[in-house]
Amino acid sequence: MKILFYDTKSYDKESFQDTLKDYQDITIEYTKSDLDPRTAALAEGFDAVCAFVSSDIGTRTMEILHEKGITLLLMRCAGFNNVDLDTAGKYGIRVMRVPGYSPEAVAEHAMALALASNRRLYKAYNKVRENDFSLSGLMGFNFYQKTAGIIGTGKIGAAMCRICRGFGMKVIAFDVYQNESLKDFVEYVSLERLLSDSDVISLHCPLMDSTYHLINIDTIRQMKDGVILVNTSRGALVKTDDLIEGIRMHKFAGVGLDVYEEETNNVFEDRSDEILEHSTTARLLSFPNVMITSHQGFFTREALGAIAATTLRNAMDYAEGKESPNDVKVG
Ligand code: NAI
């Protein structure tokens, strides 16, 4: 099987080439271009394409992939909100993903963002480097005995619940399903109660119609003053303009974001003044209590190895005509 691998970074190539040793029947060609309507035609002559969260796999891309004979889309990530599943179904393109590669990688990063924004570590780091050893502007609060509110308790949310328990926090959660494995130490509550009772709120639900802009000015107003908000899930769970309004209202002690609404617009790759001027992400960065990382939650050695192993296993399942729990329902 020949796979065209889009949006290749050196670390992707390294982990996939390493895992490929176990798969004699698969060859991969790597391109730095991301998958979108302009680059989909490159897939001519391949059996499958491998793409990522940043790819634009809407209707037009799907049509071109179909024209080029592609019948398998391998997503090397958990989320697939950027994939037009109806069109995939229409053309019989099978979509497979990596549902859980290392939930701890993302949950540990969520806690790192919560801690860093609480204790202003980014500010402390810069101050000390400039020989300023004063503590002004660095005061945080103890997490011990405070309340963590976890929205979405699937694989990553559950890992975050366990980390928060380890910090001695009371853990409350909101989900449309309850996770049985957490019942000994997590109390499920309504969204309203989670918002009003939590000192740290961390988002771990997928982006869907029902969760789009879940955090908006109404839900922000329901939060405690001095709350810490962390989003490592998907940018559009948070309505950025409303978040900025909330920050201006001094609602938040800290905000930690690994994902943001403008991620796919190459805001920071194309640093033109015009783009930055209209960028809500750039506006967010102007606040001293906001810390933003560049969608790196998944980025650990263990997670990259697991992503490569599952993606190639998915390709083999396809080649052998096997069904897989990693199939995304299309059509
Ligand atoms: P999962 O599918 O195991 O868990 C998601 C949970 O959200 C489920 O328990 C589901 O019932 C719940 N949920 C669905 N609708 C909800 C709603 N309206 N309100 C509250 N909860 C709801 O997914 P997993 O693996 O835990 O991943 C969560 C999200 O993390 C992914 O959808 C993805 O967006 C994001 N992610 C971010 C990464 C990063 O590098 N920052 C890496 C991997 C995933």
Image: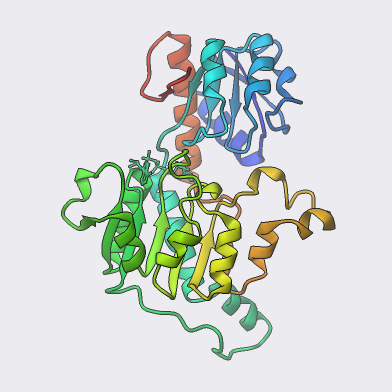
Q: Position of residue 259 (x, y in %)?
A: 56, 51
Task: Identify the image quadrant of residue 100.
Answer: top left
Residue placed most toward the observer, 36 or 103:
36
Q: Residue furthest left?
A: 184
Q: Is residue 15 above or below residue 85?
A: below
**Which residue corresponds to the image point at 43% horizontal and 9% vertical from the top-left?**
320
Residue placed most toward the observer, 9 or 293:
293
**Which residue corresponds to the image point at 66% horizontal and 58% vertical from the top-left?**
281
**Which residue corresponds to the image point at 45% horizontal and 66% vertical from the top-left?**
221
Task: Identify the image quadrant of residue 42.
Answer: top right
Q: Is residue 269 above or below residue 46?
A: below
Q: Position of residue 311 (x, y in %)?
A: 49, 27
Q: Is residue 202 left or right of residue 259?
A: left
Residue 261 visible: yes
Display colour scheme:
rainbow
Residue 112 visible: no
Q: Quadrant of ligand 1?
A: top left
Quarter of the image for the N terminus: give it: top right
Task: Identify the image quadrant of residue 155.
Answer: top left
**Which residue corresponds to the image point at 31% horizontal and 52% vertical from the top-left?**
174
Q: Position of residue 313 (x, y in %)?
A: 44, 22
Q: Is residue 220 above or below residue 45?
A: below
Q: Is residue 56 above or below residue 67?
A: below
Q: Position of residue 225 (x, y in %)?
A: 43, 75
Residue placed most toward the observer, 331 or 69:
331
